[in-house]
Amino acid sequence: MIIDRQIIKEVLISFGLPRAIIDEMDNYPAISMHIQDTPDVFISCHDDKLWMWSLLPFGLNKIDSPGALRIIDILSSTLNGADGAGVFMLQTDNGLELKASMTATNFNSSESVKLTIEGFIRKLQGIISEVN
């Protein structure tokens, strides 16, 4: 099942992204959402998956033991609509990233996609607040 890009476009409009950028969505590998006091959240569609990710503004060396336990708690809680384990953190060449994906079969409506992206953003903000 291929992702319904129209649903994604509706959701991005609801987040306040300019229509001119959304109309060009198919020409770019990812779209960046700028959120106040939060690192950019990138959205990308590939075949049957919607990917969400953000480059965290710190490295693993900035996370202390109590913070790590709270971050594990955030990561292990369910993200409705997301695939598998939900949200995960990984070290990449660019730094530490928070990621999640959503399969097209989970796209019941634009509202379900919006709720999943909002949940991802809340988890991102929670992790950042644990380190700061």
Image: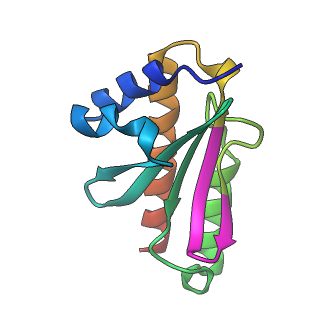
* Quadrant, the C terminus: bottom left
**Whole-percent x, y for residue 26 in the image:** 45, 36
Residue at the image position 77 percent from the left and 38 percent from the top: 84
Q: Residue furthest right?
A: 84
Q: Is residue 24 left or right of residue 16?
A: right
* Quadrant, the N terminus: top right
Query: What predominant SS class does the magenta segment belong to?
Result: strand
Residue at the image position 45 percent from the left and 18 percent from the top: 111
Against 28, is 105 above or below? above
Q: Residue furthest top?
A: 108
Against 70, is 67 above or below? below
Q: Is residue 105 left or right of residue 51?
A: right
Q: Is residue 125 visible?
A: yes
Q: Which residues are magenta?
A: 89-101
Q: How many marks?
A: 0
Residue sitting nearer the eye, 70 or 23: 23
Q: Is residue 95 magenta?
A: yes
Residue at the image position 28 percent from the left and 40 percent from the top: 21
Q: Is residue 18 visible?
A: no
Colour approach in the figure:
rainbow
Against 61, is 12 above or below? above
**Whole-percent x, y for residue 6 in the image:** 44, 19
**Whole-percent x, y for residue 15 in the image:** 30, 34
**Whole-percent x, y for residue 76 in the image:** 70, 49
Q: Residue furthest bottom?
A: 61
Quarter of image, res 50: top right
Quarter of image, res 10: top left
Q: Is residue 18 magenta?
A: no
Against 51, is 13 above or below? above
Residue at the image position 32 percent from the left and 31 percent from the top: 23
